[in-house]
Image (cartoon, grey):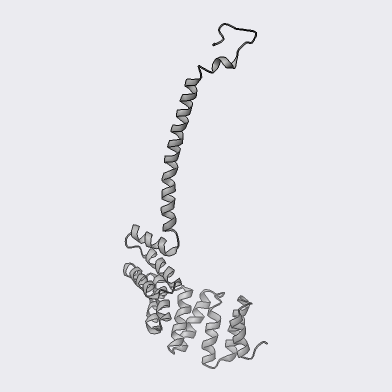
Amino acid sequence: MIAIIQVGPQARADRYTYLPLIGLYLLATWGTMALIGAAVSIITGPIAITYFQTSTWRNSETMWHQTLADTSRNQIAENSLGKALVKEHRLDEAATHFRKALDIHPDYPEANTNLADVLCLEGRWRDAVDHYETALCSAPNYAMAHNNLRIALAVIGNTDEAIVQFREALRINANYADAHPNLARCLVQIGRREDAVGELTQALRLRPDDARVKDRLRELGVGK
């Protein structure tokens, strides 16, 4: 059977191995089943974790809610959750989270600006000015805060200060397209039509397809 003594003309024969190998086959089969069981156990864990994480990362709101549940005094998560809620037009909830961020870090520029933006949407322009100015105290080169502060100042009638703020935003970032039409609006209010046209022209240079700027230029008698 093990070919120590040759039987027949063949040097060896597979048929003689069938019976002795039954045990090895059983061992290999049981070993494979054990490996499969271990593999299933290993795979099942990550699948369950992935399922849980997928529900957590379903959208920005659920992600930041989970982040806040897993951390404490996290102003970045509070601010980010507020931004996600603004996109869903849930302004009161968003403002609550911006305020929580500011309770943790009162000088947080982005949270101050985001809260001010919400106040503007609610028509509370004077309150918004305070938060924009606080943001700029800690981040003087924050162009968005400068631009939005100018808008708020223009709305409450402080046109001269709004113009100063618009020019400061453009000094910080000359390619900040939104600042040009906003500055132009203020210049029109004080009768500086030609300067307004210049600002709108600059805005159009930065964004050639901006229909609102083109319409504004036509209102001022420039273009077709």
Residue at the extreme bottom: 191
Front position in the image: 7 or 79? 7
Quarter placement of the N terminus: top right
Question: How many discs mark residues in the rendered view?
Answer: 0
Q: Can you say which quadrant of the picture contains the C terminus?
A: bottom right
Residue at point 57%, 10% (across, down): 3
- The image shows residue 34 at horizontal and vertical percentages of 43, 32
The spot of residue 170 in percent (x, y) is: 53, 77
Q: Which residue is drawn at 48% across and 84% down?
A: 164
Q: Residue at x 44, y 63 (%)?
A: 60
**223, 202: nearer the viewer:** 223
Q: Residue at x 61, y 76 (%)?
A: 207
Residue 103 in which image quadrant: bottom left
Q: Where is residue 151 in the image (x, y as percent from the top left)?
A: 47, 83
Residue toward you, 75 or 6: 6
Residue 102 versus residue 155 in the image, above or below: above
The furthest residue to the top: 5
In the image, 27: left or right of 68? right
Among the 4 quarters of the image, the one containing residue 4: top right
Q: Work out whether 109 lies above or below 119.
A: above
Q: In this view, does 76 lie to the left or right of 205?
A: left
